[in-house]
Image: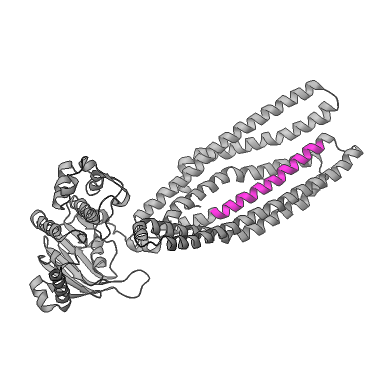
């Protein structure tokens, strides 16, 4: 927890006041059985009504004070515990935002969601319990033990058996429960993974009528979580009757030996009643501590999972004095090799080419030829394994990440829009963009033709993931969003695949007219999308197969020629 304690500074006042109030509540609770014994042994024996009323009023005041102290302690404990968890959640979320694609490949999305929600909530609960239950239980046990010894030290010897047996039960169950709670969190990850995958692809599931298959897959993982949870909870359930057996056995022993002392006149009846109350408080404190330790085990598992994220160093690191401005959009790959972390096989091999500022570069190749991976090296979504990527005359590793990515606009293969309005989504490209600038970008991306038809225009609602737009509309909106960055380099990763050829041609024409001076890289499956590019890069099995203009490639590149002829036949058949 040391690495995380910095998040408690903001809530230190509540964290300190909570246990103080908890101790005051314990003192009030401890005082009440003592007053009760005095009422029985003095007030009732002597039939002193005034004494009984006086002590009775003090008991009521003590009970009210205990209630007030308990309420305030609970409030402050919750503020400190959940505030602490909130700070941790902020740090973890910020850490994830700084991850490279390589780091994100290490954790599943469902696992990160569980760590940000379930695990952080558990840490908050454990922190709150640490400030309250972990203080109340030992102080209650200590003070109750002192009072029991003051009443009858010889009778208190029953604790010599009860306390060690209780402690042994707690330790054994803790040892068995720890791995189960760790496994339970992993099971939650796996359930979340199925839920996320199913809901993301729910349209595909329905179109293929695979609901029964998905329900079966979910049931397997859900049952695994249920069974693991039941095993862990069963230990707690098993512990309850054991602890109750110890408590009631101790009370029976006290009643037997204490009753003999009351009969012999060496112990008062009120003292026996208060002694039993203190015994119950002591053993209930032990039970309370056992619950705390059980929750602490869950919390320690959650802390470990959170620290796995926080201790993960980003693969992308900045130099001490980075370059903060790109001179131009020129680009060069020099002897570039790339392999994914943990893999020995290079998926990009010996990549060498260069283009000048303002050029349009087309990239084409068969599926799996690593076209997308190639362009992801430009804004440092991944870092090269060997060689260098030069942008604006400098290695991309020499730039400040923000400066580099602000000047390299990337329209990913998978188009993502966020819930809100069209205007809010466009302002991801430029927070200060005016409506005129947004409309201009929408026109360049051929998106204004459908946006202008909405009654609310730029205020038209975007549902989560852009589910209320077609694939082609989403692609055009994401292109417009990228154009608003006014970048020096724009990369379109197969981002016009869902638009018709006429619209695609208009987008290419708009780029040619409006983006002079901007280096444009277009990954496409259709040769018609890139045949007018200044140069075309043909990829095959992670290598550059050919590099040149459309007419040249038809003559020198077997791969390019095959793609072209196949598509031409398709057009003729169509």
- Image position of 443 (left or right of 52): left
Q: Is residue 17 visible?
A: no
Q: Is residue 5 above or below residue 177?
A: above
- Magenta residues, start to end: 271-298
Residue 545: x and y, percent?
Answer: 18, 76
Residue 508: x and y, percent?
Answer: 12, 59
Q: Is residue 283 magenta?
A: yes
| Residue displayed at 64% across by 29% down | 64
Q: Is residue 136 above or below residue 346?
A: above
Magenta part, dominant SS:
helix
Residue 169: x and y, percent?
Answer: 69, 56
> In the orientation shown, which residue stands out farthest toward the top?
50
Q: Is residue 3 above or below residue 397?
A: above
| Residue displayed at 75% across by 26% down | 55
Residue sitting nearer the eye, 192 or 294? 192
Q: Quadrant of residue 542?
A: bottom left
**Numbered disc total:** 0
Residue sitting nearer the eye, 438 or 447? 447
Q: Quadrant of residue 415?
A: bottom left
| Residue displayed at 28% across by 49% down | 468
- Image position of 333 (left or right of 62): left
Q: Quadrant of residue 546?
A: bottom left
């Amino acid at each position: 927890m040391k690495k995380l304690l910095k998040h408690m500074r903001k809530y230190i006042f509540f964290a300190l006041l909570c246990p103080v109030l908890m101790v005051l509540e314990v003192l009030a609770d401890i005082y009440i059985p003592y007053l009760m014994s005095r009422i029985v042994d003095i007030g009732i024996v002597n039939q002193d009504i005034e004494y009984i009323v006086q002590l009775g009023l003090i008991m009521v005041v003590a009970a009210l004070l205990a209630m007030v102290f308990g309420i305030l302690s609970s409030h402050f404990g919750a503020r400190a515990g959940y505030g602490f968890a909130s700070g941790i959640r902020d740090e973890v979320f910020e850490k994830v935002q700084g991850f490279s694609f390589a780091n994100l490949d290490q954790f599943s999305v469902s696992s990160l969601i569980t760590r940000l929600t379930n695990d952080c909530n558990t840490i908050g609960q454990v922190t709150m319990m640490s400030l309250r239950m972990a203080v109340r239980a030992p102080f209650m046990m200590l003070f109750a033990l002192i009072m029991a010894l003051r009443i009858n030290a010889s009778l208190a010897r029953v604790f010599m058996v009860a306390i060690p047996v209780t402690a042994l039960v707690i330790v054994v169950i803790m040892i068995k429960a720890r791995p189960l709670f760790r496994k339970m969190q992993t099971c939650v990850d796996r359930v979340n993974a199925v839920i996320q995958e199913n809901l993301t692809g729910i349209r595909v599931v329905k179109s293929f009528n695979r609901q029964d298959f998905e329900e079966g897959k979910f049931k397997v993982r859900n049952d695994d979580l249920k069974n693991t949870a039941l095993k862990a909870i069963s230990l707690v359930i098993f512990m309850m009757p054991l602890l109750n057996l110890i408590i009631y056995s101790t009370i029976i022993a006290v009643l037997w030996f204490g009753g003999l002392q009351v009969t012999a006149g060496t112990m008062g009846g009120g003292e026996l009643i208060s002694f039993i109350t203190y015994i119950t408080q002591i053993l209930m404190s032990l039970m309370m501590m056992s619950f705390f330790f059980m929750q602490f085990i869950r919390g320690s598992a959650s802390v470990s999972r959170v620290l796995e994220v926080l201790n993960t160093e980003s693969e992308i690191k900045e130099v001490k004095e980075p370059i903060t401005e790109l001179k131009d959009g020129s680009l060069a790959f020099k002897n570039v090799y790339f392999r994914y972390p943990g893999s020995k096989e290079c998926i990009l091999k010996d990549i060498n080419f260069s283009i000048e500022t303002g050029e349009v570069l087309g990239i084409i190749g068969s599926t799996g030829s690593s076209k997308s991976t190639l362009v992801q090296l430009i804004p440092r979504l991944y870092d090269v394994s060997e060689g260098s990527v030069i942008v604006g005359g400098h290695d991309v590793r020499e730039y400040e990440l923000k400066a580099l990515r602000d000047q390299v606009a990337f329209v990913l293969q998978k188009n993502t829009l966020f819930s809100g309005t069209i205007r809010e989504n466009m302002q991801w490209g430029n927070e200060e963009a005016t409506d005129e600038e947004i409309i201009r970008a929408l026109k360049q991306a051929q998106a204004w033709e459908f946006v202008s038809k909405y009654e609310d225009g730029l205020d038209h609602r975007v549902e989560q993931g852009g589910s209320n737009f077609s694939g082609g509309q989403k692609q055009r909106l994401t292109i417009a969003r990228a154009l608003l960055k006014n970048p020096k380099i724009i990369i379109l990763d197969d981002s016009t695949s869902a638009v018709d050829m006429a619209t695609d041609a208009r987008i290419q024409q708009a780029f040619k007219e409006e983006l002079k001076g901007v280096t444009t890289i277009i990954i496409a499956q259709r040769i018609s999308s890139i045949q007018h590019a200044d140069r075309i890069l043909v990829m095959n099995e992670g290598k550059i197969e050919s590099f040149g203009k459309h007419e040249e490639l038809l003559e020198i590149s077997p791969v390019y020629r095959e793609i072209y002829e196949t598509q031409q036949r398709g057009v003729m058949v169509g």
